[in-house]
Amino acid sequence: MTISRFTTSVAMIAVLTVATGAFVDGSPARAKRTIVVRMLGDASGYRFRPASISAHVGDVVKFVNVSGAPHNVAFWADSIPAGAAATLQENMQRTTDELTGAMLNDPKDTYTVSLAGLRPGTYRYYCTPHLAVGMVGRIRVLP
Ligand SMILES: [Cu+2]
């Protein structure tokens, strides 16, 4: 075996080792998660909790009405990644307007937004009835 062939063999083994390690450590299909965001309104104010979350494309955000209803989830069309509105609109069920979800009135009502197929970036949203009192949130969508 010449020096150069030996070097090539070592390099190939290194590549194979790295590739195998990646396969073992990082499963190619990430498990889909559901992240819960509570909608609250009481003496402490109106808010989403947590107001800021990070999630991955394919995850689901589940909003749960806890107190102070009615609440909803509405995204600002100019505060989401460019070109993301159409997919986000498709991923929102029971919409009442552009990027605006159904109103939740009863305790424990839920509203889910799928992050499937969305462009990574920050998505800012608010609650229509309580925007004036600062009920806003954001979802950072990671690849
Ligand atoms: Cu609200």
Image (tube, rainbow, N blue to C red):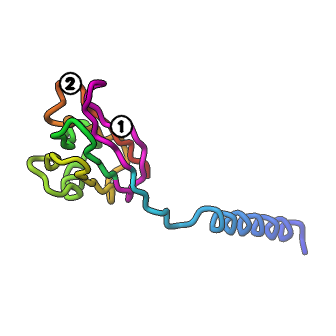
Task: Tell whether position 87 is magenta.
Answer: no
Q: Is residue 5 left or right of residue 34?
A: right
- Tell me the element at label 2: helix
Q: Quadrant of residue 123?
A: top left
Secondary structure that dominates the magenta span: strand
Q: Quadrant of residue 7?
A: bottom right
Residue 136: % across, % down:
27, 32
In-front residue for pair 109/125 = 109
- Which image quadrant: the N terminus? bottom right
Q: Quadrant of residue 74?
A: top left
Q: Ligand 1 falls in which quarter?
A: top left
Q: Which mark is residue 133?
A: 2
User: Residue visible at 57% across and 66% down?
Assistant: 27
**Residue located beneath label 1 in the image:** 49
User: Residue visible at 21% across and 41% down?
Assistant: 75
Q: Is residue 58 above or below residue 46?
A: below
User: Residue visible at 32% across and 42% down?
Assistant: 38
Tell me which segment is drawn in magenta. 36-60
Residue 23: % across, % down:
63, 68
Label 2 – label 1 distance at C-alpha: 15 Å
Q: Residues within 10 Å of mark 1 (few under 14, many from 20)?
A: some
Q: Amino acid at mark 2?
A: Val
Mark 2 and mark 1 lie on one chain; the one further toward the N terminus is 1
User: Residue visible at 43% across and 48% down?
Assistant: 142
Residue 33: % across, % down:
43, 57
Q: Amino acid at mark 1?
A: Arg
In-front residue for pair 12/82 = 82
Q: Is mark 1 within 8 Å of ligand 1?
A: no
Residue 2: % across, % down:
89, 71
